[in-house]
Image (cartoon, rainbow, N blue to C red):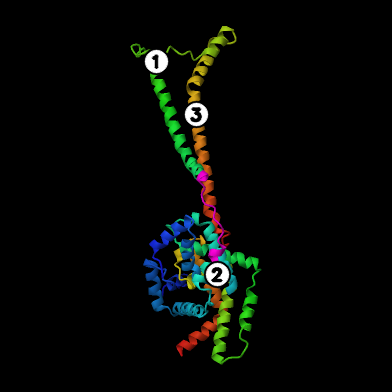
């Protein structure tokens, strides 16, 4: 005879067993008087519980009327609040749009700058072209005053050029990312609080 | 008059936008079930009605957080079970008194069979009320509301495996407490 199936008998009794578990329990029950008795006891327990009557409660109509009288005024969404809500959902969209806009502008600027430096824009109207940009003002000044010279001056010039060209973009990207992450964190916190509100304190295990 | 689920969804949507009549219709639909669950949890009809009112007021206040794709019954029963537990805590678990009241309601000695039946009902009710809260909630939803393990899991925010283990535990305790009754009933049926 196969192993007793005590732990599955409740689920079997409640029609909650399927597939191989169901077949296994049925096969075992067919040949095991101990498990049969256990199942019979479960069935008797259910009929004993059924015998306990529920009292006569207030009729549904009357009860609904009583509840209706006690219902507090629910705070409806005011128009101002609605606008704020729309504004809240526009925040990530705005961040995304500004990121796309600034990145595109930066890229176009870089392309124009490179083209200009290569002399490809000589025939183009003046508003699109601009003179060579001096990106090493500070290090040049430091060199003129004799504070820096040689390799030090070269390093300072490279660093200044790098800072002037890339730093604004890095700062911008990091700021957008931080704002976006903050928005997600607040959204998640609001959502979690919202989901827990009606639950009250759940039963302990 | 009963509403199909599509109608229930409409009622929920209307109630969510502040329609009290639609909400009253939902109260009417679920009042008996909610009162029954709370009564089985706490054993006192008056407390059950008070806690049921509390349940529907909480539901009204938090209706915006209810998602229509989930079961309204499970959502309401979750609030009901919590309201029952809150009420029991507030009333400092008056269950023993409720049981005594029940026994004192009809002191006249009736025919033996009737006495046995009443005694048996009292014993069973007492045994259910003596179960741990968490196991009792699962047993009540299964035995008196006929909910599936998944529905119970949704209502109590636990896994179906936990539902099964709590139900096994509750029934094991009940069988131990009501062993004699079960034995007698089985004997009678076999005779």
**Can you say whether A20 is above or below A49 in the image?**
above
**Which quadrant holds residue A128?**
top left
**Which quadrant holds residue B82?**
bottom right
Determine the chain carrying the residue at label 3: A
Q: Nearer the viewer, residue B25 or A138?
A: B25
Q: Nearer the viewer, mark 1 or mark 2?
A: 1
Q: Nearer the viewer, residue A90 or B142?
A: A90
Which region is colored magenta?
Answer: A66-81
**Can you say whether A179 is above or below A37 in the image?**
above
Which residue lies under the disc numbered 1? A127
Q: Taking the image as drawn, is residue B167 in sight?
A: no
Q: Position of residue A83 (x, y in %)?
A: 49, 42
Determine the chain carrying the residue at label 1: A
- Mark 3 vs mark 1: tell me if same chain: yes
Residue found at x 48% / y 13%: A134
Q: Within 10 angstroms of label 1, few (less than 14), some, or many (20 or more) residues?
A: few
């Amino acid at each position: 005879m196969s192993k007793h199936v005590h732990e599955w008998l409740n689920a079997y009794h409640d029609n909650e067993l399927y597939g191989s578990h169901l077949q296994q329990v049925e096969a075992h029950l067919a040949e095991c008087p101990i498990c049969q008795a256990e199942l019979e006891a479960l069935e008797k327990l259910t009929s004993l519980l059924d015998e306990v009557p529920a009292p006569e409660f207030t009729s549904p109509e009357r009860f609904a009327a009583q509840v209706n009288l006690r219902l507090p005024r629910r705070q409806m969404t005011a128009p101002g609040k609605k606008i704020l809500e729309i504004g809240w959902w526009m925040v990530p969209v705005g961040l995304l749009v500004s990121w796309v806009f600034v990145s595109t502008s930066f890229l176009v600027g870089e392309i124009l700058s490179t083209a200009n430096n290569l002399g490809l824009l000589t025939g183009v109207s003046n508003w699109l072209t601009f003179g060579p940009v001096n990106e090493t003002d500070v290090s040049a000044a430091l060199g003129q005053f004799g504070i820096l010279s040689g390799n030090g001056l070269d390093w300072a010039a490279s660093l200044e050029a790098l800072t002037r060209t890339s730093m604004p973009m890095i700062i911008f990207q990091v700021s957008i990312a931080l704002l976006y992450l903050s928005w997600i964190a607040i959204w998640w916190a609001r959502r979690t609080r919202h989901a827990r509100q009606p639950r009250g304190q759940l039963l302990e295990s | 008059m009963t509403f199909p689920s599509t109608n229930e969804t409409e009622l929920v949507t209307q109630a969510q936008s502040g329609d009290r009549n639609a909400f009253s219709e939902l109260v009417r639909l679920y009042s008996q079930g909610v009162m029954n669950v709370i009564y089985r949890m706490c054993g006192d009809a008056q407390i059950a009605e008070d806690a049921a009112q509390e349940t529907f007021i909480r539901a009204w206040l938090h209706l915006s957080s209810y998602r229509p794709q989930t079961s309204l019954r499970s959502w309401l029963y979750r609030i009901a079970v919590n309201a029952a537990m809150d009420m029991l805590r507030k009333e400092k678990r008056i269950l023993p008194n409720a049981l005594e009241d029940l026994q004192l309601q009809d002191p006249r000695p009736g025919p033996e069979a009737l006495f046995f039946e009443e005694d048996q009902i009292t014993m069973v009710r007492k045994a259910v009320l003596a179960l741990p809260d968490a196991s009792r909630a699962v047993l009540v939803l299964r035995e008196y509301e006929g909910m599936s393990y998944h529905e119970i899991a949704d209502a109590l925010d636990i896994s179906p495996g936990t539902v099964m283990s709590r139900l096994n535990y509750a029934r094991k305790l009940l069988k131990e407490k009501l062993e004699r009754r079960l034995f007698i009933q089985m004997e009678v049926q076999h005779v």
